[in-house]
Image (cartoon, helix red, strand yellow):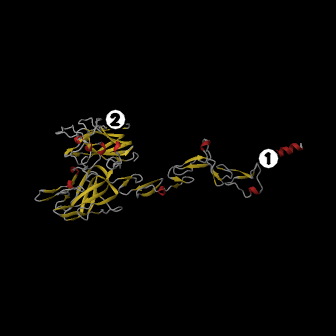
Amino acid sequence: MGPFIFALVLCVSVSVPQHAKGEECEPNPCANGGACFTALADEAFSCECHSGFAGPKCASVVEVAADGEDPTSAGPCHPNPCHNGGMCEVSETYRGDTFIGYVCKCPPGFNGIRCQHNVNECEREPCKNGGICTDLVANYSCECPGEFMGRHCQYKCSGPLGMEGGIISNQQITASSTHRALFGLQKWYPYFARLNKKGLVNAWSAAEKDRWPWIQINLQRRMRVTGLITQGAKRIGSPEYVKSYKVAFSNNGKTWRTYKVKGTDEDMVFRGNVDNNTPSANSFTPPIEGQYIRIYPQVCRRHCTLRLELLGCELTGCSEPMGMKTGHIQDYQITSSSVFQTLNMDMFSWEPGKARLDKQGKVNAWTSGHNDQSQWLQVDLLIPTKITGIITQGAKDFGHVQFVGSYKLAFSNNGERWTVYQDEKTRKDKIFQGNFDNETHRKNVIDPPLYGRFVRILPLVVVRSDYFACRAARVHRGRLSCVPQHAPAPNTQAPRNIGILKITPASR
């Protein structure tokens, strides 16, 4: 029996760990009350952990399933140890020598073992063009200089809104009073207040008895206004100009807010002109958003006499020129149904490549070779583009005033299958109002925008034109004119087209 007993005792001593009395368990290496045993195999010791703890040394806290609870719902991820919406995943993970059993997948804007730290996104300098970055919780914001906008201040918003070019019509410009001179024969109306206007009467001037003069521009919709250029004028040979002024804005023309010094309730007084002819520019940081803009002269030399231009863009920012005027859109991208030649001479060929807004010279626009409503001027934008507006302008053909009174727009992605832009309410082809003379710019907003790589102007009555857009959004301008007859009948004259193309990414 001896050997049998010995064998049995030997088996028990191997199969059941005993409390260790050696150096490995003194002091006890097992945390949280765990019991230390002499180890098996190659380990020096092993720990038997109390309920709720795990790991080689019982250092990790483990959720214990309650009575009736699915045991699989318990573990290192229950409850979720990750902060700020981090996702916990069970993992054989150690922190140093400590087994923690999980890893946290942090959402954007947070980091750390438990997603407990907010990332400072401003360290990446995401704000462009002088924008000031402010770090937020898992986010950031850019405070842009007045003439820039967008998430990263990446879009410029400082184009002329139309006082000088004529996009802003006479009816949109009003004032508190009008100065009348030479027994009332000379009237300095508010709609003369256009930057660089020429002539004997070339500015707005308030009446002498007007103690609180103002001039107002109705932009017809809310727009972002980022700056103002002012200019004086001469009246009866005497320089007159506004030395300082305030600016107010409104969305309805009734309730007004005066532009304030940043961070205060003090009205901002802008420095104006120092002579009658040199333009003076001021920017608005932050920009103004409103439909109505008023300028209140504060100090004037002699009379309060003013010419001006507003700077800014659509609220979407999608109104920067795309390149017809600058040449960014090249001649090969501009085609037409036909071309007219004055006196059948090549040197007087009114080609589509001349269809650029404000183009100078004797031959300064596109003119169609035929007098019918099948004529068109086309621009290939090279990529799908979001068109948000168009500016048109007429021209003169050796003294003959020509312009397009109305037109349609068509667009395509392949240059073969075309869609005519439709009125959203009537579901019929939209007819856009064209020009009233050969020189003034006429702007039409395309709302909702159209999308396409190719854009065509389809003249109905007699243009120069300019589109506004965004790449996958863009905008275009063009000049357009028709072949002159001895006495052209209405609706038969095709336009001259001069275009400037504006572009803004569709993601804006």
SS of the residue under disc 2? loop
Q: Tell me the distance, in whole angstroms, between the alpha carbons under discs 1 and 2.
A: 88 Å
Whole-percent x, y for residue 334 in the image: 33, 42
Q: Residue furthest right?
A: 1
Q: Is residue 166 left or right of residue 12?
A: left
Q: Amino acid at mark 2?
A: Trp
36 and 213: which one is in front?
213
Q: Residue furthest left?
A: 183
Whole-percent x, y for residue 393 in the image: 25, 46
Residue under label 1: 14
SS of the residue under disc 1? helix
452 and 393: which one is in front?
393
- Residue at image position (37%, 46%) is 470
Query: In the rendered image, which quarter is residue 430 located in?
Result: top left
Q: Amino acid at mark 1?
A: Val
Residue 479 showing in the rendered view: no
Q: Tell me the mark number nearer the camera, choosing from 1 and 2.
A: 2
Of labels 1 and 2, earlier in sequence is 1
Which numbered circle lies on residue 418? 2
Q: Is residue 395 left or right of residue 388?
A: left
Relative to 66, is 263 above or below? Answer: below
Q: Is residue 361 left or right of residue 157?
A: left
Quadrant in which the N terminus appears: top right
Whole-percent x, y for residue 148 in the image: 37, 54
